[in-house]
Image (cartoon, coloured by chain):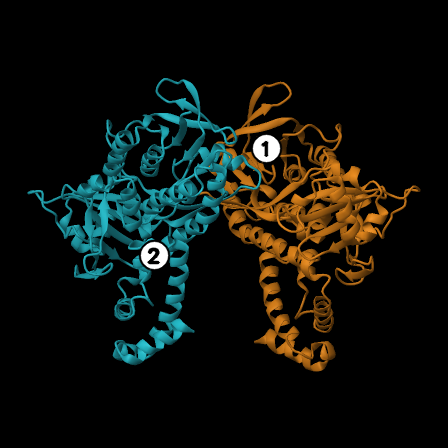
Chain colours: A cyan, B orange
Amino acid sequence: MEKKAIIVGAGLVGSLWAVYLAKAGYKVTIYERRPDIRKAEISAGKSINLALSTRGWKALKEVGVDKEIEPIAIPMYGRIMHDMEGHQTFQPYGAEGQAIFSVSRGGLNAKMMDIAEEHGNAVIHYSHRCVDVDLEKGIVHLHNEETGANVQDQADVVFAADGAFSAVRYNGMQKLDRFDYSQDYIDDGYRELLLPANADGSYQMDKNALHIWPRGRFMLIALANEDGSFTCTLFMPFEGENSFEHLTTDAAVDKFFKETFPDFYEMFPGLIDSWHGHPLSSLAIIRCFPWTHGKVALMGDAAHATVPFYGQGMNAGFEDCTVMWELMKKHNENWPVIFKEYEKLRKPDGDAVQDLSKHNYHVMRDYVADPMFLLQKKIEKRFSDLYPDKWMPLYSQVSFSSIRYSDAWNTGMKQDAIMKKVMDRPDIEQVWDSKEVEEAILSMIDA
Amino acid sequence: MEKKAIIVGAGLVGSLWAVYLAKAGYKVTIYERRPDIRKAEISAGKSINLALSTRGWKALKEVGVDKEIEPIAIPMYGRIMHDMEGHQTFQPYGAEGQAIFSVSRGGLNAKMMDIAEEHGNAVIHYSHRCVDVDLEKGIVHLHNEETGANVQDQADVVFAADGAFSAVRYNGMQKLDRFDYSQDYIDDGYRELLLPANADGSYQMDKNALHIWPRGRFMLIALANEDGSFTCTLFMPFEGENSFEHLTTDAAVDKFFKETFPDFYEMFPGLIDSWHGHPLSSLAIIRCFPWTHGKVALMGDAAHATVPFYGQGMNAGFEDCTVMWELMKKHNENWPVIFKEYEKLRKPDGDAVQDLSKHNYHVMRDYVADPMFLLQKKIEKRFSDLYPDKWMPLYSQVSFSSIRYSDAWNTGMKQDAIMKKVMDRPDIEQVWDSKEVEEAILSMIDA
């Protein structure tokens, strides 16, 4: 008998998961709320360029589709910090040659849909909004936004990859007794700007780095696009001093950029027009549990939406595919067993990627411009080079390994406690590369 | 022009708040989802007798309705602990004569509805389910569950006192951008039993105490009703050792009570029938913010539902009325200003009553049977008697004062830290009433 699966959401995770299911012999149907983005203008604004890193590549590679993404991915080997005078400082992300990759959400999503259709033999129904779900029976009720028709479909197994505000979770899981759920908005919102290429199509800045203008309580970042432009994002509080509430007139916006990001301002005569082209958006961390019930499982943002500051949202969602796939093989497609183990195994990692994202927000915003923080990173790098099996920097654990997020987070917090003691030495700037500091770290690791 | 207010929910808080609004000259309309409980059998099960304490009485007194509740309230002067051998130990809640009051939820709610109609001139529409709300305009859309009609109503100001799973919050607030929300279920559920009176109508136990059978990870409690019966509640984990999952047969239930609560078992030949009369229910802590938007404010459980272990859910809801009333007077019914200050002022107290409730769960379940805990309480009482302005026990702050919950919680945590150090003395059992211990506490308070 034919095995049938439904995926709700043709986003990044849903499209990739379709390829996995097809590989296991499932006939896959995807229902997507939006129209086909490949035929329409990509909606402006809420995109934030994505940073594809090791976990994401691994999940793509497992089903042989990494080669199709490589051409649209731009390697970024480190951060370039821009100070108030326009001086730039480069800080590598990892070892020589290690990079995270800038990809545009729209471009990647379109490519992933192609892949789902070609490699997953998936049928994607667009403009289908999930309005109800029978978790026990695996029935999904949908409203066709174009025809107005109400349809339903049933499958052996249903996956909700329909994002942070998942309709499957809302209409199904959230009505269950004892379903834990939280949505926490951070105090900061974001607004995008598209910094154009030079007239000759070349980049205005180094494309192989993530650019940051850290300014304490707020920051601007920029990631390169294939066409020479940069997608730039201003993260800032909604209210208070230096907040979006003060940027309500063109004059205020112009003055703010001119005074706060002078080198950026110089590059960007069309700033104000670009400002108007994108809405102010909010950012939330969404946690819930359980992630599965009956024949339905949540994946990606539907299970563990996070804020974008570690660039791990998509990577975590792709890794959900890796984890689910391993469990499918381990339990021979016994879904009730797979689902139980999936949510139990993966929930701490979903929580950890959220903790990591919040942590990195502070790092990017407050610390990357701090000389003592840069010194700390130098000490960590020196020690890690000397004792690679005793110390992998947290950033490398998260971005360049498949170490469980929860393990990375725990190790990272221990490393932070050790480094805090090291940095508390009044003479640290003199002795940072001494044998003594090295021994002190060693003894604390083994303590 | 006539001032008009809508209250959604004719529960305890909604009914009381109607009296306040009437006093301020508002024409009050209440919409209640359920039928009139005064005309129907009170629904079995989900009641947990309530404990009315100082904050609740204060809110009733302000509008002169406390005298109507007194006849149905039974004072409880302390806890009576029942050990495995049936031995009873009494522990007073406060000073001589201080009590919290047992009231049945159904009886109190019926009385409060009478009061809303008589003192508040409120019109209560029953079987009206809120299906949508326009927060900005103060319009409430309702479905009449009896006639099937859809109706709507509009007022100058709308109050949602419709409980933990508030329809106003769900259909209104929860759809707002940047609305923080969480529902956290505790690992434990509860099930009620109604221990009958003796044949002559007299009580089987002392009615003027809250009875507890603390058993570590679970507990049974009993509160007196007016008719000689006791409403008893078993709180226990859903899963694991000693959990509800093992109590699935009559034999298992019988054996469990016989072995775990022998004196209770002896009093209760009809135990099994009573067990079947009530469902297993879950317990959640619900937090959200903001509590107000446009013309609508959340009150009581709709804003800050908690678990019942401090007996403060209703008292906190009644105190919301006190707080809102003070702000109405302060800001001369300028609702936008009142609402902003209400949510800012009261949110930390909503959070604190939840922290207190979780804390007291552990106290009731794990500690009240512990001799060292009882000694600690004796030391605290002795010190508090000597220095009443330096130490008010946490329980008294919460139950016998109107000190803000958030202040009580902070003070209580400081007291706990001090008492932990005191109890860590190896000789504490010998020196507990010494001048030395007294001085040690004094110095820690002033530190």
Q: Position of residue B397 (x, y in %)?
A: 67, 60
User: Helix, strand, or loop for circle 1?
Assistant: strand
Q: Residue A93, percent across and down?
A: 24, 58
Looking at the picture, tell me which residue is in the foreground, B246 or B122: B246
User: Disc 2 marks which residue?
Assistant: A360
Does mark 1 fall on the same chain as mark 2? Answer: no
Host chain of mark 2: A
Is residue B61 depicted above or below A29 in this figure? Answer: below
Q: Amino acid at mark 2?
A: Asn
Q: Residues within 10 Å of mark 1 (few under 14, many from 20)?
A: many
Residue A291, can we see it?
A: no
Residue annotated with mark 1: B6
Which quarter of the picture shows residue B363?
bottom right
Check the image and name the residue furthest to the bottom: B436
What crowding class fits label 2: few (fewer than 14 Cα within 10 Å), some (14-19), or many (20 or more)?
some
Q: Quadrant of the N terminus of chain A?
A: top left
Q: Is residue A270 left or right of residue B167?
A: left
Q: Nearer the viewer, residue B64 or A434?
A: A434
Rendered image quadrant of residue A301: top left
* Residue furthest out toward the right: B200
Count of number-bearing discs: 2
Dot 1 amino acid type: Ile
Q: Is residue B381 above or below residue A296?
A: below
- Please state which of the two labelled residues, at mark 2 or mark 1, is closer to the viewer: 2
* Residue A428 sits in quarter: bottom left
